């Protein structure tokens, strides 16, 4: 093998290393300085009790999942209303099967206590 066969590969490797070094130098130069968050009263005029980016309590996650299930239901029902007259009975059967699956999900969430707050 001749060295001229490897010249494009070496040129690409040099270009890649130069790009990585340049991106690293750019990230060091533009790095944001982290300082503690000093906020005053917000909205109600009271001092905040926790950081605004703190995590939500775990009890909100099942509520979020139930909301997303109902949100997906609405997302599928709007186009269905446009095609139900053209498709006919199969569209109605499919929608009731879909709603049955969602109802089973709500029953499961209810049984597991996703709607209880305490």
Image (cartoon, grey):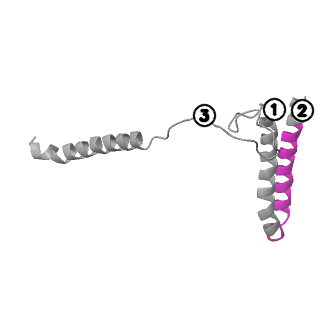
Disc with the residue nearer the chain's start (3 vs 1): 3
- The answer to whether residue 57 is visible is yes
Vertical relation: 83 (above or below) 29: below
Task: Please tell me which residue is depicted at 80% across the width and 53% down the height of the picture.
Answer: 73
Residue 84, percent across and down?
82, 66
Q: Are marks 3 and 2 in contact (CB under 8 Å)?
A: no
Disc with the residue nearer the chain's start (3 vs 2): 3
State the residue position of label 1: 59
The Cα–Cα distance between marks 2 and 1, rounded to whole angstroms, is 8 Å
In the image, the segment drawn in magenta is 84-108
Residue 33, percent across and down?
50, 38
The Cα–Cα distance between marks 3 and 1, rounded to whole angstroms, is 28 Å
Q: Residues within 10 Å of mark 3 (few under 14, many from 20)?
A: few
Say what secondary structure mark 1 lies in: loop
Q: Residues within 10 Å of mark 1 (few under 14, many from 20)?
A: few
Disc with the residue nearer the chain's start (2 vs 1): 1
Camera-near label (3 vs 1) is 3
State the residue position of label 2: 117
The Cα–Cα distance between marks 3 and 2, rounded to whole angstroms, is 33 Å
State the residue position of label 3: 36
Q: Are marks 2 and 1 in contact (CB under 8 Å)?
A: yes
Camera-near label (3 vs 2) is 3
- The answer to whether residue 87 is visible is no
Say what secondary structure mark 2 lies in: loop
Magenta span dominant secondary structure: helix
Residue 26, percent across and down?
38, 44
Q: Nearer the viewer, residue 44 or 80?
A: 44
Q: From the image, which quarter does the N terminus lie in?
A: top left
């Amino acid at each position: 093998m001749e060295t001229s066969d490897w010249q494009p590969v070496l040129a690409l490797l040099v270009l890649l290393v130069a790009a990585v070094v340049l991106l690293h130098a750019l990230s060091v130069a533009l790095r944001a300085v982290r300082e503690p968050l000093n906020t005053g009263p917000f909205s109600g005029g009271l001092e905040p009790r926790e950081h605004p980016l703190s995590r939500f309590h775990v009890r909100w996650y099942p509520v979020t999942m139930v909301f997303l299930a109902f949100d997906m239901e609405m997302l599928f029902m709007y186009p269905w209303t446009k095609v139900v007259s053209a498709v006919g009975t199969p569209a109605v059967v499919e929608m009731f099967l879909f709603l049955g699956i969602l109802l089973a999900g709500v029953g499961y969430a209810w049984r597991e206590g996703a709607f209880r707050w305490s």
